[in-house]
Amino acid sequence: MRITRRHVAAAGALVLATASLPSSSHAESTDEAAIKKAIDDLSKAMIAADKAKLEALVSDQLSYGHSAGRIETKAMFIDVFVSKKSVYKSIVITEPTVAVVGNNAIARHVFAVETETDGKPGSAKVGVMQVWTKDGGAWKLLARQAFRLGS
């Protein structure tokens, strides 16, 4: 069977739809909790510009997409923080959802950030979809895409 974009989109929609169904009996899995912790750890490493933690939390094949369309590799992503070109002052994550699918996970949330770039303060609030993959027992960020939120 040839897998097309339509198949991938349908599968993704199904995973997200079932993950967002209300269920009072749904207990958070160990993997879901680990993903949420990894997201929190990544935010803390971004604020601290902690190169070692950033290296450990993201995959070598990272594709990091910004809402304006710019794509960064792992090296480019980490350099933003360690070079201090952009300083992340605070990160607030709201509306988190996580759907674990085997050794992969799809995480969505709203990402609000306060930054300083070239001495100028800035802020952004965007929607984010992340794909995490289990690598050697640890969850690593494989892909991230931000998108503008509707008003």
Image (cartoon, rainbow, N blue to C red):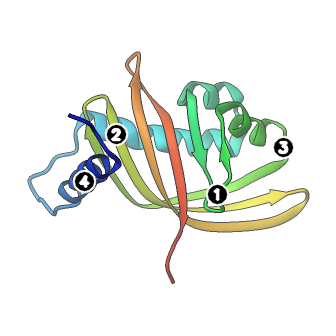
Whole-angstrom CA distance, mark 1 to mark 2, is: 23 Å
Q: Which residue is mark 3?
A: 84
Amino acid beneath label 2:
Ala
Mark 2 secondary-structure assignment: strand
Q: Which residue is mark 1?
A: 69
Describe residue 39's horizontal placement relative to residue 30 as left or right: right
> Viewer-nearest of labels 2 and 3?
2
**In the drawing, what numbered circle is on residue 51?**
none
For marks 1 and 2, the one nearer the N-term is 1
Q: Are marks 2 and 3 in contact (CB under 8 Å)?
A: no
**In the drawing, what numbered circle is on residue 10?**
4
Whole-angstrom CA distance, mark 3 to mark 4, is: 40 Å
For marks 1 and 4, the one nearer the N-term is 4
For marks 4 and 2, the one nearer the N-term is 4
Q: Which residue is mark 2?
A: 105
Whole-angstrom CA distance, mark 1 to mark 4, is: 23 Å
> Viewer-nearest of labels 1 and 2?
1
Whole-angstrom CA distance, mark 4 to mark 2, is: 16 Å
Amino acid beneath label 4:
Ala
